[in-house]
Image (cartoon, rainbow, N blue to C red):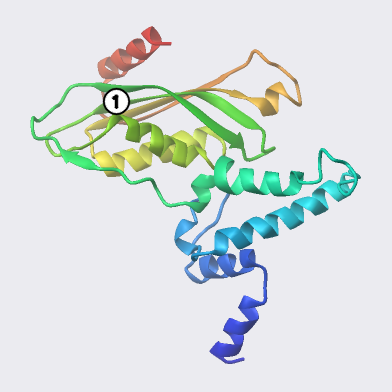
Amino acid sequence: MNDLENKGSLLDRPVSDRIRNRLRQADRGFLANDNIAGFIEPGELDLLLDEVAGKMRGVLESLVIDIDNDHNTQDTARRVAKMYLNEVFQGRYRPAPPVTEFPNVTSLNELMIVGPITVRSACSHHFCPIMGRLWIGTMPNQHSNLIGLSKYARLAEWILSRPQIQEEAIAQIAELLMDMVKPDGLAVVMEADHFCMHWRGVKDTGSKMINSVMRGSFLKDSALRREFLSLISMKS
């Protein structure tokens, strides 16, 4: 099969196959919490929404729900597809939000904390909601890039708007901010309710998960780490 025939056969396949093919050719992963925006061509998100809606109809039919006659679920498949692609999992399908960086002209080198930032995600195991709060601490140096306070929230939302587990999510946030801000140290703490525990399984509505990621000076300097943790506890 020549290149033209191969291209034609790809165009006849579902758009998800085309996107997967590009990712595989580039040797790029497409795990649940990966961003694949760079491999989606203009117009394909609309096609992907149609494809997901069609497959969601099949799920509802397999659940023995009469979507043809039930007025409550006639449009559910498309609503769910729009929710996943445009809202809950939009961090997979859209590029990072624009962030303006400023040089540290006054050589700030004191602890900076942003939070609590309200965050929302979905557990990649059951697609149940994760609702919580996030704190970010940085120790800038003269070479650091400073970003606006709102941008911390936007970047966190971009990472968390994917199927996630909490441990990997805050590690991704830390990696992104270390690369972007280039501080001497970075700390990220997240506290969240997991509805895969509240809603199903043990149905324990009182449990929360709290975890942290420390980089650079926060990892090496126990006094700095204690200062950060004590300050965010005052704001809880």
Q: Position of residue 210 (x, y in %)?
A: 51, 21
- Please name whichever residue, 140 or 86, is drawn nearer the observer in this view of the structure: 86
- Please name whichever residue, 161 or 126, is drawn nearer the observer in this view of the structure: 161
Q: Is residue 119 left or right of residue 180?
A: right
Q: Is residue 146 left or right of residue 32?
A: left
Q: Residues within 10 Å of mark 1 (few under 14, many from 20)?
A: many
Residue on which disc 1 sits: 218
Identified at 40% across, 10% down, the residue is 233
Identified at 33% across, 12% down, the residue is 231
Q: Is residue 132 visible?
A: yes
Q: Position of residue 217 (x, y in %)?
A: 25, 28
Q: Position of residue 204 (x, y in %)?
A: 71, 16
Height in image: 19 above or below 114?
A: below
Quadrant location, the N terminus: bottom right
Height in image: 15 above or below 85?
A: below
Quadrant location, the C terminus: top left
Question: How many tags in the picture?
Answer: 1
Residue type, label 1: Phe
- Please name whichever residue, 132 or 28, is drawn nearer the observer in this view of the structure: 132
Picture quarter containing residue 55?
Answer: bottom right
- Please name whichever residue, 211 or 119, is drawn nearer the observer in this view of the structure: 119
